[in-house]
């Protein structure tokens, strides 16, 4: 080979390397421009609309500890800090609630937008904002000013999501905060579809049997739930109460919650906030701690409107990126909007639509020093209906149900018919002082896991999406199993995955198969696995998979018997308890041979498992059927690099009736334990991380602890700031 040729090759290599270097530099410059440049300042001094300097000290997890002279300045700084961390999430939340997603993503979100427009969410938010009590309005305005101050600063370099989608966010308003509250209200109270589904089973079904499937109405098996409990000092190692909370909500990336600590005069509160709302929703102050779970009381009814009922038509214009706008006509009667049921007109009344009802007592709650002040704040809480669990440093524990809960004169599970005499109309709302409330029960424990909190005879027609008792029962059993409890014990209970209902049904099916002397080898092996199973819904367990599939086929068989051809429609939250009760009682008018029904369900379960995971039951894994894939709504969809903004697929432990309630759709949205003997011994973590900025260091730095069932220290008095930003008066 000639020297000339060698030099030519070397020259080409040098040029190639130089070109690669330039491309890398250009790529790095692009990354810096689009990703690093929008990163908000975490230290230094900025001018702001505050009355006195405000310090925002961020700890090792990026949690802001805000110190201000006044509550309004603290809320301004909260708005500023959450917009710094989660500006795109804020915009996405209000757009989802208002039905404005198609404007930025195109027609793929049209059904979501239609649903929100039919519920009149933007209209309701604006009406609620216009009628807020003056003190509440002032708090919201302070928070909104902070959000917009951050938004104005970011306009020169918006977070990458806005750049990829090609739009700029509008200023934040008080009505936008109302939308965030209404979206959570909708998430936790949507029961009108449940009413409609039961009506479908009743149509052509055996009424007595269908009613048996719906004791006090349950909800869909992916209905968000939660656990919260408090134990008195007589049961703890420290001699002071412990309080735990792990709200179960739809998976979200960024996380549903945003952690914050607010200090201003008597206000000194830390915990979890909802992006878009001021104050702390779950947490503790200097004297009390509290947690929440969804009450599940039914606050929606569908009404059969007679022909010629007075109504108006509201026109909604849905903007759609890359397509002409859609005109959506929404018919509204005196009960509310007519819903798309596909049959006769059914109008929905919803407690959240009671204009003038919305109040925001969370700042009062954040300031409460005892149970009386705690209850006084909750007296103004409009909804969604919640179970609030309480503990204080004096050793007291308590419970209070909340919300505007309608009183129904009659309710038999049928869709009510609108009538002139008002027979099926709401008779007002349950007075606050008649809602369930407990203070220092003799047992020393208070446990709520979405179960029915009312006594057997509440004095009115009770109706709600209550959970079966399994989670509550297991929590109490775990708390009573140890004489002196500590924070680690609380976390252990939150991670419990024992499924009592599946265990019972699985063993009954296994016994039926043995009595039937099944010859199928896989079926016999599955029955043996169920017989020796301990009820733990662990990802690696083959028996857990068999038990789940067995339950699903049993549930379908029972529903099919009650309403032929509609077995697949039945998936109610109370289903596990209903199935277990029927299996134990075995009424003769359901099946002449219950063993055959049980054996067939297990045979079908084994067939499905064999099709999906092969012929050897010992190699089956429950986690394959309970896999989480969690991705950022925009960044995870970028070609080639989107995988770096996703979590999973990862197999999860737990099920809908286990204390750790996990499905591919929902899971614990945080782990919070308050130690009333030492606030700095309290722990809290959220699913992914504090920040929505990819390279902030806090994008998903909490995931590993979350997945492992651990929680991070929750600094309160002993704060070690890593960065400090000061907001100084303009």
Image (spheres, rainbow, N blue to C red):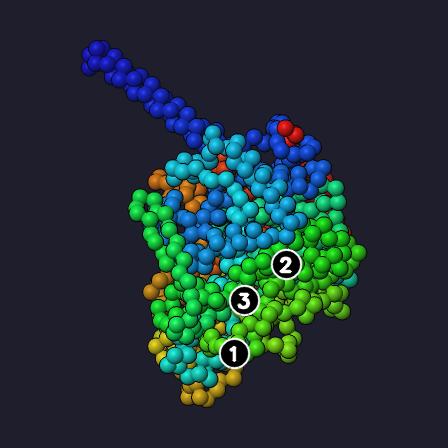
Give the camera-side residue of 616 and 368: 368
**Inter-mark Cα distance, 2 to 1:** 31 Å
Q: Earlier in the sequence, mark 2 or mark 1?
A: 2
**Residue under label 3:** 299
Residue holding disc 1? 421
Image mark for residue 524? none
Q: Quadrant of the N terminus?
A: top left
Q: Residue at x 72, y 62 (%)?
A: 398
Give the label, 2 or 1, closer to the camera.
1
Determine if residue 199 is in view. Answer: yes
How many other residues sit within 10 Å of disc 3, few (<14), some (14-19) or many (≥20)? many
Q: How many C-alpha atoms fall within 10 Å of the one at disc 1: few (<14), some, or many (≥20)?
A: few
Q: Secondary structure at mark 1?
A: loop
Residue drawn at x 55%, y 59% as measured from the top left: 355
Q: Quadrant of residue 65?
A: top right
Residue 100: percent from left, percent from top: 42, 49
* Foreground of the two, 525 or 629: 629
């Amino acid at each position: 080979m000639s020297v000339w040729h060698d030099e030519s090759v070397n020259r080409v290599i040098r040029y190639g390397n130089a070109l690669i270097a330039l491309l890398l530099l250009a790529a790095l410059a692009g990354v810096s421009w689009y990703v690093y440049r929008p990163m908000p300042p975490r230290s230094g001094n900025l001018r702001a609309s505050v009355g006195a300097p405000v310090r925002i000290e961020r700890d090792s997890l990026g949690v802001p500890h805000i110190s201000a002279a006044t509550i309004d300045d603290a809320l301004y700084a909260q708005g500023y800090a959450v917009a710094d961390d989660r500006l795109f999430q804020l915009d996405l939340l209000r757009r989802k609630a208002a039905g404005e997603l198609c404007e930025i993503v195109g027609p793929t979100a049209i059904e979501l937008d239609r649903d929100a427009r039919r519920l009149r969410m933007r209209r309701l938010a604006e009406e609620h904002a216009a009628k807020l009590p003056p003190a509440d309005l002032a708090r919201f305005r302070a928070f909104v000013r902070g959000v917009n101050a951050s938004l104005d600063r970011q306009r020169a370099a918006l977070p990458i999501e806005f750049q990829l989608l090609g739009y700029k966010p509008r200023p934040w308003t008080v009505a936008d905060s109302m939308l965030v509250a209404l979206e959570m209200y909708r998430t936790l109270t949507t029961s009108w579809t449940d009413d409609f589904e039961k009506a479908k089973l009743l149509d052509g079904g055996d009424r007595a049997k269908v009613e048996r499937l719906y004791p006090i109405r349950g909800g869909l098996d992916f209905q968000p739930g939660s656990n919260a409990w408090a134990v008195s000092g007589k049961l703890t190692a420290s001699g002071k109460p412990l309080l735990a909370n792990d709200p179960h909500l739809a998976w979200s990336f960024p996380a549903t919650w945003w952690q914050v600590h607010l200090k201003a005069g008597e206000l000194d509160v830390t915990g979890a906030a909802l992006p878009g709302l001021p104050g702390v929703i779950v947490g503790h102050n200097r004297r009390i701690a509290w947690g929440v779970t969804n009450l599940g009381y039914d606050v929606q009814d569908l009404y059969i409107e007679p022909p010629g009922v007075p109504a108006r038509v509201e026109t909604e214009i849905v903007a759609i990126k890359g397509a002409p706008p859609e005109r959506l006509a929404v018919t509204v009667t005196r009960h509310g909007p007519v819903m798309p049921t596909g049959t006769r007109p059914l109008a929905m009344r919803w407690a959240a639509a009671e204009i003038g009802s919305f109040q925001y007592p969370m700042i009062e709650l954040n300031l409460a020093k005892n149970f009386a002040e705690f209850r006084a704040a909750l007296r103004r809480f409009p909804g969604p209906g919640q179970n609030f669990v309480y503990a204080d440093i004096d050793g007291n524990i308590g419970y209070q149900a909340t919300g505007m809960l309608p009183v129904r004169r009659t309710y038999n599970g049928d869709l009510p018919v609108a009538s002139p005499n008002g027979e099926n109309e709401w008779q007002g709302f349950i007075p606050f002082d008649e809602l369930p409330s407990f203070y220092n029960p003799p047992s020393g424990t208070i446990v709520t896991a979405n179960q029915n909190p009312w006594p057997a005879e509440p004095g009115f027609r009770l109706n709600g999406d209550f959970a079966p008792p399994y989670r509550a029962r297991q929590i109490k059993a775990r708390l009573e199993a140890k004489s002196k409890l500590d924070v680690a014990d609380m976390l252990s209970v939150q991670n419990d995955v024992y499924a009592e209902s599946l265990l019972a049904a699985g063993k009954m099916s296994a016994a039926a198969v043995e009595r039937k002397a099944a010859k199928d080898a896989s079926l016999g092996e599955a029955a043996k696995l169920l017989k020796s199973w301990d009820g733990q819904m662990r990802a690696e367990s083959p028996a857990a998979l068999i038990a789940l599939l067995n339950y699903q086929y049993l549930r379908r068989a029972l529903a099919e018997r009650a309403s032929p051809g509609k077995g697949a429609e039945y998936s109610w939250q109370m289903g596990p308890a209903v199935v277990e009760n029927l299996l134990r009682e075995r009424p003769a008018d359901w099946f002449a041979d219950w063993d055959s029904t049980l054996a067939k369900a297990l045979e079908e379960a084994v067939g499905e498992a064999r099709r999906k995971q092969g012929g050897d039951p010992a190699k089956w894994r429950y986690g394959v059927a309970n896999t989480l894939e969690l991705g950022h709504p925009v960044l995870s969809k970028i070609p080639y690099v989107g995988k770096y903004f996703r979590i999973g697929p990862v197999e999860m432990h737990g099920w809908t009736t286990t204390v750790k309630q996990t499905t591919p759709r929902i899971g614990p949205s945080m782990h919070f334990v308050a130690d009333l003997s030492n606030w700095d011994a309290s722990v809290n973590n959220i699913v992914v991380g504090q920040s929505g900025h990819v390279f902030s260091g806090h994008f998903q730095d909490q995931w590993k602890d979350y997945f492992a069932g651990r929680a991070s220290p929750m600094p309160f008095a002993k704060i070690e700031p890593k960065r400090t930003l000061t907001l100084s008066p303009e």
